[in-house]
Each structure stands twice: as C-alpha cells, then as structure tokens.
Amino acid sequence: MTIRTVLSILSVHQFEEDLKTAIDFCGVHGAHLNALVISLGTAPTIGNYNTISSVWLDERQREIDVLSRRTDEIKTTLDRSEISCEVQDVYTEFAWADEDIAERALYADVVLIGGRRPETTVSANASSMVHSSRRRPRSSSTAEHGR
C-alpha cells in the first residue's frame, strides 16, 4: 500500500518528539504530512442567571494564545524540513475531540498519535474513533454538535 497522506496528532504541551517522528516517517515514505495541533479546553462553568465565568474566558483565551504560538513553532520546524506538509490547529472541548480528530482522519492513509502523557491524555473514545473512522464514514457538522 502506498502511503500518500499522514495525519499526525500533536499536543500543544509536548510535541517535539512526535513531530520529529512524523517528519522522519513522511520523509521515508515520500508522504504529505498534515500536522494537527490540538488544545483541549474545558467546558464553561455556567453560574447563576446563565452567565459564564470571566475566569474561564481568560483561561480559554490563554489556551488559544498558547495554541497559536505552538502552531507557529511547528510551522517553523516543518519549513526547515524537506517534506510536503500543512499545519492545522484545533481548539476543542474534550467532549468533541474524538469528532474533530475522526473528521480529519477520514482523509489520511495513516494516523500517527503520540505517546500518552498525563497533561495530554486523549480519551480512549477519541483513539477508537480515529481507527473506526476508516471503516465507517461519519457525518459531522457544527450544527449536530450544538456549538
């Protein structure tokens, strides 16, 4: 089987080794690398009168800023490599991570998921969605998620 497209799932916290592995893998196989940088946010805490905490909004913005900086770092690293590549960043809630990953995994020949680390744990459901997405296509839209 010829490998043409590789999806690499990267955390904003520890991605260096996973990115290096993905670059090496794509270099050997002559494949296009799609680096997916993921930041998992927490669901908002809703207080009285359906208000959202300003602390949560500040934390969310901080996480989005970190995601943007890490994405830029990854783009810089990939620009120095000699492989065909692109970078996408996703800020998502833990509950929707499996859908966000599976949606992109449908278009890849191989999906690389890094090792489990305490601060970057992805649910077993997300991993199974990536693997099962090759067997049965799933329809996904933001309207279905209620976002």
Image (spheres, rainbow, N blue to C red):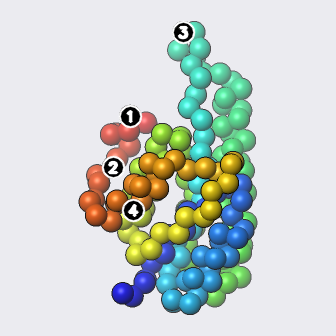
Please tell me whether mark 2 or mark 3 is closer to you in this view.
2
**Residue to which mark 2 is pinned:** 140
Q: Specify which label sits upstream in the sequence, 3 or 4.
A: 3
Q: Residue furthest top?
A: 49
Q: Look at 55% across and 50% down and name the residue there.
A: 122
**Residue to which mark 1 is pinned:** 146
Q: Specify which label sits upstream in the sequence, 4 or 1.
A: 4
In the image, is 37 to the left or to the right of 77? left
**Residue to which mark 4 is pinned:** 131
Q: Look at 68% across and 39% down and name the residue there.
A: 61
- Kindly indicate whether the residue at mark 4 contacts the one at mark 2 (C-beta within 8 angstroms): no
**Residue to which mark 3 is pinned:** 49
Q: Is residue 33 visible?
A: yes
Q: Is residue 75 visible?
A: no
Judge the density around disc 3: few (<14), some (14-19), many (≥20) Cα neighbours within 10 Å: few
Q: Look at 57% across and 82% down and name the residue there.
A: 25
In the image, is 122 to the left or to the right of 56? left
Please tell me whether mark 3 or mark 4 is closer to you in this view.
4
